[in-house]
Each structure stands twice: as C-alpha cells, then as structure tokens.
Amino acid sequence: MTSIMILDILIVLGLVVSAGMAVHSERLLSAAISLGVTGLFAAAAFLLMHAPDVAISEAAVGAALTPLIFIVALIKIRGGDDK
C-alpha cells in the first residue's frame, strides 16, 4: 500500500470516529468540539483530493465558524455549564 492510500484510510477513520463522537456525546460542548474535528478531517480529505479551495472553505466554515457559533450559543444559553 502506498503512503497516500494509508493517509486516506487514516483520514476516513478519523472522520468516522469524530462524527461518531459528535453524535453519541452526552455533553453538548464535547459534541461541538467533535464537530470541529470532523470538519478538520473533511478539510484534509478535500486537500488530498486536490481541491484546495474547497478545503479552505471547509476549514473556515466546518472546522472553525460552525463549532464556534455552537459554543457561543451554549455559553449564552447555559452560562457555560452544559449539564
């Protein structure tokens, strides 16, 4: 197996694990952070597919902006305590 194929497999495994953590997490803050990690893995996958413009967009929106909005909303709604 080539190194690119191994990297593809690791990225897909990272996507699946982080998405599973986001779905099955009981704490909302942990789910939001896992969502950001999922966005980072998706951006890495797009980068490996030679789509740097899509990777930059995914990193900015999926890995940074969306989890940030969720975290700020959780802080404002619950005062920082999510349980």
Image (cartoon, rainbow, N blue to C red):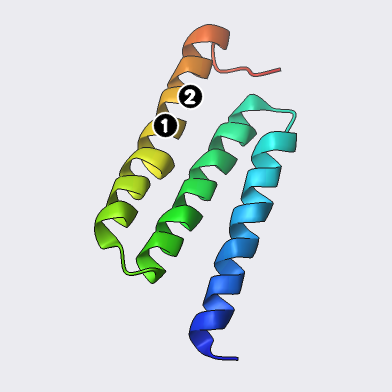
Mark 1–mark 2 Cα distance, whole angstroms, equals 6 Å
- Considering every residue shown, the one lying at the far top of the view is 77
50 with respect to 15 (left or right): left
Q: Residue furthest bottom?
A: 1
Image: 55 above or below 82: below
Label pair 1/2, CB-CB below 8 angstroms: yes
Q: Quadrant of the N terminus?
A: bottom right
Q: Residue at x 54, y 11 (%)?
A: 79
Q: Is residue 4 left or right of residue 61?
A: right
Q: Nearer the viewer, residue 69 or 12?
A: 12
Q: Which residue appears at 50% of the width and 57% of the height? A: 41
Q: Residue at x 27, y 61 (%)?
A: 52
Q: Position of residue 42 (x, y in %)?
A: 47, 54
Amino acid of disc 1 = Thr
Image coords of residue 60 (percent x, y)? 31, 43
* Front in this rendered view, residue 3 or 51: 51
- Report x, y in % for residue 34: 58, 42
Q: Is 75 rendered above or below residue 26?
A: above
Q: Quadrant of residue 27?
A: top right
Secondary structure under tag 1 reads helix
User: Where residue 73 sits in the image (x, y, percent)?
Assistant: 47, 16
Residue 11 tag number: none
Which residue is at a point 75% across and 29% down the rendered structure image?
Answer: 26
State the residue position of label 2. 70
Is the residue marked by circle 2 packed among few (<14), some (14-19), or many (20+) residues within 10 Å? some
Q: Is residue 72 above or below residue 26?
A: above
Name, please, the residue furthest toward the left.
53
State the residue position of label 1.
66
**Image check: 10 left or right of 49?**
right
- Which quadrant of the view contains residue 5? bottom right
Kind of residue indicated by mark 2? Phe
